Image: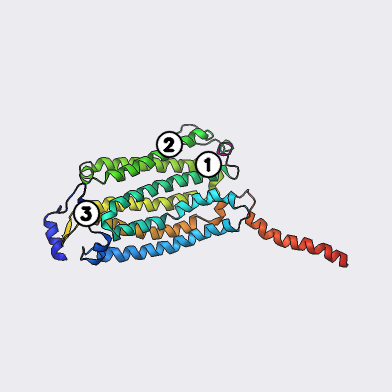
């Protein structure tokens, strides 16, 4: 295999590019049964192991969230918040499996890259809705909850203190919405290798600006409603989720700059973008293990309810013995 690597190194671009070129890229079966680049001898076991660990940790987190909802006498009250918490808490599991698929099936890495981008924006939107659910509480009235907050610097650029309002929430929603459009669009643009190589700096700058705007928006919402949602550890939730996506983006960009040589082995051709995607996938699955452990601490069953709301699980648990005692009291009184 080292001979093939040396031959490829003499000509950094030996694989075809453009529409239809993917037919020469290896499929899942060809990739697993035919000789391939030396890098996959390390990437494949690392990715499989990290994915298995992430799955085990994430499954425990999801089970912890599902159990209180099943025991609750009013599961309908917990359902909206449960769904919103399940999406970001399952992010390490979903991302790890998608990255594993990129390593197993190199031909499909571009399509899977778009799927990863779409899931990332879904996680950001779900987290935004979760913050609004925390703010609104059991009533769901976000405006009334914000009206009770003491005046403060709502935005870092603000010059005076004021109470946050629904206009600020709409600005936050708009800043998150633009990211939901930009990121999948950039992932689709990267289907064209020539367009990416000629405008790499431009697309990278657009990605960073859009991402920073989204991060600032959600952090601003956490800060402006801090008095209401401080007990939900929103910063830990946000940065646990964000660490995964930042790691995925950074590893993909760095690997794309480091790996610059195609490899042709027999009739199969591995572009340097494909190899870079494989390296990025292995790094991301490793990060997913760390993030899955952080999410265990960030997403807890107690977050399904607000402190001021009655706990339906506790009510049922405390109520049953009480009914027994009340039923025994008259009998003991009559026997006396």
Position in image of residue 89 (x %, y %):
46, 54
Tell me the crowding category of disc 3: few under 14, some 14 to 19, or many 20 or more residues within 10 angstroms, Cα based: few
Is residue 322 magenta-colored?
Answer: no
Dividing the picture into quarters, in which one does residue 93 lie? bottom left
Image: 172 above or below 322: above
Quadrant where the C terminus lies? bottom right
Residue 323 is at least partly visible in this image: yes
Circle 1 or circle 3, nearest the eye:
3
Q: Percent from the top left, x then y, of residue 159?
A: 46, 32
Mark positioned earlier in the residue sequence (1 or 2): 2
Residue at image mark 1: 225
Do callouts 2 and 3 mark residues in contact (Cβ within 8 Å)?
Answer: no
Disc 1 residue crowd, few under 14, some 14–19, many 20+, Cα 10 Å? many
The residue positioned 53% from the left and 44% from the top of the image is 133
Give the magenta-colored segment's residue range.
Answer: 140-144
**Which residue, given by chain and number where applicable, does mark 3 sit on?**
23
Q: Secondary structure at mark 1?
A: loop
Q: Quadrant of residue 108?
A: bottom left
Q: Disc 2 designates what residue?
A: 174
Looking at the rendered structure, the number of numbered marks drawn on it comes to 3
Does the magenta portion include 141? yes
Looking at the image, which is closer to me, 54 or 165? 54
Q: How far across and how far down the image is residue 114, in percent?
A: 33, 48
Q: Residue at x 12, y 60 (%)?
A: 7
Question: How many angstroms separate mark 1 from mark 2 (CA)?
Answer: 18 Å
Magenta span: helix, strand or loop, mainly? helix
Q: Earlier in the sequence, mark 1 or mark 3?
A: 3
In this picture, residue 224 sits left or right of residue 255: right
Q: Residue at x 60, y 58 (%)?
A: 71
């Amino acid at each position: 295999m080292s001979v093939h690597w040396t031959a490829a190194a003499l000509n950094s671009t030996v694989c075809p590019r453009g529409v239809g070129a993917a037919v020469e890229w290896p499929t899942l079966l060809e990739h697993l049964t035919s000789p391939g680049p030396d890098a996959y001898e390390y990437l494949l076991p690392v990715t499989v192991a990290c994915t298995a660990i992430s799955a085990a940790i994430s499954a425990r987190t999801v089970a912890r969230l599902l159990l209180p909802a099943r025991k609750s006498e009013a599961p309908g009250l917990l359902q909206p918040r449960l769904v919103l918490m399940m999406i970001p808490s399952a992010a390490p599991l979903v991302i790890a499996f998608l990255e594993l698929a990129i390593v197993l099936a190199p031909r499909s890495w571009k399509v899977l890259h778009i799927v990863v981008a779409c899931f990332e924006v879904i996680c950001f939107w779900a987290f935004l809705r979760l913050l609004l659910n925390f703010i609104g509480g059991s009533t769901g009235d976000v405006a009334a909850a914000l009206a009770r907050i003491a005046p403060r610097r709502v935005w870092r650029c603000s010059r005076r203190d004021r109470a946050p309002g629904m206009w600020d929430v709409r600005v936050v929603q708009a800043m998150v919405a633009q990211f939901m459009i930009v990121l999948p669009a950039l992932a689709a643009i990267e289907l064209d290798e020539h367009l990416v190589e000629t405008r790499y700096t431009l697309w990278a700058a657009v990605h960073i600006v859009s991402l920073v705007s989204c991060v600032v928006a959600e952090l601003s919402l956490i800060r402006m409603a801090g008095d209401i949602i401080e007990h939900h550890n929103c910063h830990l939730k946000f940065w646990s989720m964000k660490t995964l996506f930042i790691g995925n983006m950074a590893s993909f960009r760095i690997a794309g700059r480091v790996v610059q040589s195609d490899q042709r082995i027999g009739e199969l051709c591995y572009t340097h973008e494909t190899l870079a995607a494989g390296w990025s996938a292995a790094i991301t699955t490793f990060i997913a293990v760390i993030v899955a452990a952080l999410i265990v601490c960030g997403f807890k069953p107690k977050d399904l309810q607000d402190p001021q709301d009655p706990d339906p699980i506790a009510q049922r648990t405390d109520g049953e013995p009480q009914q027994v005692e009340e039923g025994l009291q008259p009998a003991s009184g009559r026997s006396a």
